Amino acid sequence: MKVEEFLSPSDTVIDLRAQDKRRLLNELCNRAATTLKLDADNICAEILKREELGSTAVGGGVAIPHARVERLAKPFGILARLRKPIDFDAIDGQPVDLVFLLLLPTSAPAEQLSALATVARRLRDPVTVRELRRAGDNASVYAAFVAHHNA
């Protein structure tokens, strides 16, 4: 699955300010709800339910909060670079500064795994992560993520 199918340049944000994990997730869920014209409370509830199972911070300052959402036709993502890293209960104890919120439809399990795998692969690539952190604007962050060197 290509990133362009579920991430658009307008859903890429840099210098996002967040005081803590819960507020960050609420902000990202509200942004997603506005774009998708879905209920923000429902999206937040699903994301927080997934976080209760275990943190979606994968280490190295990266988190991939994700959940299945009713009435969603296809995967949808928001890529955010935080102004200041925050605690995200990461397995390596490092604060998180790169977050990819991934919402998945309740149907099409193969498509869901493909989208999640695509995001995880890109955010494990040290060159991509370095470029995401160095990018000067939203368009550059998007370009770095889409270009991914080991795709």
Image (spheres, helix red, strand yellow):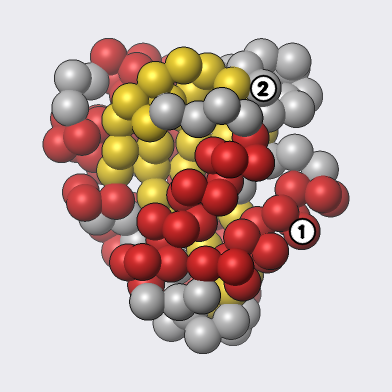
Quadrant position of the C terminus in the picture: top left
Task: Depth check: give the residue in front, 86 or 7.
Answer: 86
Which secondary structure, mark 1?
helix
Residue 7: image location, x then y, percent: 31, 55
Vertically, is 54 above or below 20? below
Q: Quadrant of the N terminus?
A: bottom left
Picture coordinates of residue 35, whole percent (x, y): 32, 66
What kind of residue is marked 1?
Lys
| Amino acid identity at mark 2 | Asp
Task: Look at the image and tell me whether residue 64 can be seen.
Answer: no
Left or right of 40 in this view: 94: right
- Which image quadrant is residue 105 in? bottom right
Q: Relative to the observer, which residue lies in front, 124 or 27?
A: 27
**Sooner in the amino-acid sequence: mark 2 or mark 1:** 1
> Mark 2: which secondary structure?
loop
Can residue 53 be seen in this snapshot? yes
Q: Residue at x 27, y 14 (%)?
A: 134
**Residue that carries the numbered disc 1 in the rendered image:** 49
In the rendering, which numbered label is found on residue 87? 2
Image mark for residue 22? none
CA–CA distance between discs 2 and 1? Answer: 18 Å
Residue at (67, 22) in percent of width and height: 87
Q: Badge 1: how crowded within 10 Å, few (<14), some, or many (20+)?
A: few
Structural crowding at the residue carrying mark 2, measured as other residues with C-alpha within 10 Å and reported as few (<14), some (14–19) or many (≥20): some
